[in-house]
Image: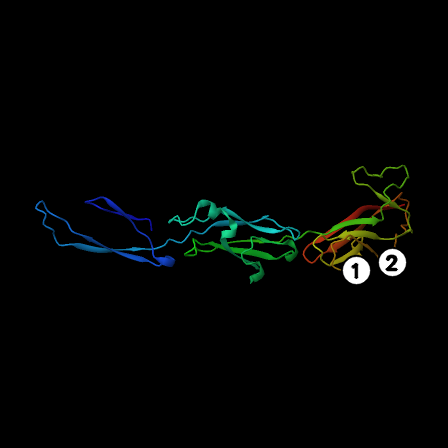
């Protein structure tokens, strides 16, 4: 549309347009050239079909680009659609609500989110793949779809061993570091029993499995239900440190707590568990 045809003799511009509802309009053009005596030659007749140009596909992204399950998802226009016919203004194309929007999760269309520019975080879970398809319209025709997708990242569990925690073996108010490696040493006496406790938390609210290891050997395991709150766990039986038959001032053992949320495993270790 917007093609201008000028009648050469009188220079009268005629603006062409498509028909109602964007249907093509056909214009018939007749040309009667005249010689210097005013005699008209045979007319040349041709047609012009005027059609609507649909808008171009926009370029979009989903933000944040690395989301977790506590983030809302929002579709963002990187480059708005454009319309060769100028049916809509530039400001129109900059408004995300003037586009047709469809969301899907793991290839399943979410009809309840049609034409919504965002997804609330409570609908997302770690490991899901969310995609958005979007296209513009000039009120007559729709342009092509463009698509963007992201994956919901997993928030790994937070793990803190709360018992044993007596790193001040000589009671001087400071954490001990017998070997000077910068890692506090946790002290016990041989044959002492140690209650194993920890606090674990998963911000995604997933169920957690945990395992306690002593010197690489599994000594206890369990699980906690789905929750976003901090939860306290403990071994069913206390750990009894072995008695070593030698004259060494202390012996070093390793205590490890491994926590699995189904996607990632977090292991926290005391590699300087010293028995005197």
- The residue indicated by pointer 2 is 237
Give the mark nearest the N terminus, 1 or 2: 1
Q: How is the image coloured?
A: rainbow
Q: Which quadrant would the C terminus be assigned to in this image? A: top right
| SS type, badge 1 | strand
Q: Residues within 10 Å of mark 1 (few under 14, many from 20)?
A: some
- On the image, the x and y values in percent for residue 119 come to 60, 54
Q: Residue 254 has which mark?
A: none
- The foreground one among 172 and 206 is 206
* Image x and y of residue 218, in percent: 79, 58
Q: CA distance from mark 1 to mark 2?
A: 12 Å
With 93 as the anchor, is 261 left or right in this view?
right
- Density class for disc 2 (Cα within 10 Å; few <14, some 14-19, many ≥20) is few
Q: Nearer the viewer, mark 1 or mark 2?
A: 1
Question: Does any portion of residue 79 appear in the rendered image?
Answer: no
Q: Position of residue 195 (x, y in %)?
A: 87, 53
Circle 1 residue: 222
Q: Do tag 1 and tag 2 residues touch (Cβ < 8 Å)? A: no
| Residue displayed at 77% across by 57% down | 210
Q: Is residue 115 visible?
A: yes
Q: Is residue 216 left or right of residue 20?
A: right
Residue drawn at x 45%, y 52% is: 57
Question: Which residue is rendered at x = 22% and y = 44% of the image?
Answer: 11
Residue 50 horizontal/vertical position (percent)? 31, 54
Residue furthest left as drawn? 37
Q: Nearer the viewer, residue 251 or 13?
A: 13
Instruction: Name the side, left or right, on which 64 lies relative to 271.
Output: left
């Amino acid at each position: 549309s917007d093609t201008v045809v000028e009648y050469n003799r009188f220079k009268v511009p005629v603006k062409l347009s498509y028909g109602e509802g964007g249907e093509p309009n056909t214009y018939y053009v007749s040309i009667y050239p005249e010689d210097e005596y005013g005699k008209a030659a045979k007319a040349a007749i041709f047609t012009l079909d005027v059609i609507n140009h649909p808008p171009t596909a926009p370029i979009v992204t989903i933000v944040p680009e690395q989301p977790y399950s506590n983030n809302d998802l929002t579709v963002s226009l990187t480059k708005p659609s454009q319309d060769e016919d100028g049916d809509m203004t530039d400001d129109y194309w900059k408004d995300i609500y003037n586009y047709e929007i469809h969301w899907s999760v793991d290839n399943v269309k979410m009809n309840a989110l049609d034409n919504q520019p965002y997804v609330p975080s409570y609908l997302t879970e770690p490991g899901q793949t969310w995609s958005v398809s979007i296209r513009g319209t000039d009120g007559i025709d729709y342009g092509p779809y463009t698509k963007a997708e992201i994956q919901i990242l997993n928030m790994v569990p937070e793990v803190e061993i709360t018992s044993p925690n007596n790193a001040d073996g000589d009671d001087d108010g400071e954490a001990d570091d017998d070997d000077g490696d910068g890692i506090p040493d946790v002290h016990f006496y041989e044959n002492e029993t140690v209650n194993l406790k920890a606090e674990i938390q998963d911000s995604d609210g997933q169920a957690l499995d945990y395992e306690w290891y002593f010197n690489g050997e599994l000594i206890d395991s369990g699980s906690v239900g789905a929750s976003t709150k901090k939860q306290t766990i403990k071994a069913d039986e206390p750990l009894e440190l072995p008695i070593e038959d030698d004259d060494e001032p202390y012996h070093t053992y390793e205590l490890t707590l491994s926590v699995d949320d189904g996607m990632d495993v977090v292991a926290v270790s005391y590699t300087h568990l010293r028995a005197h």
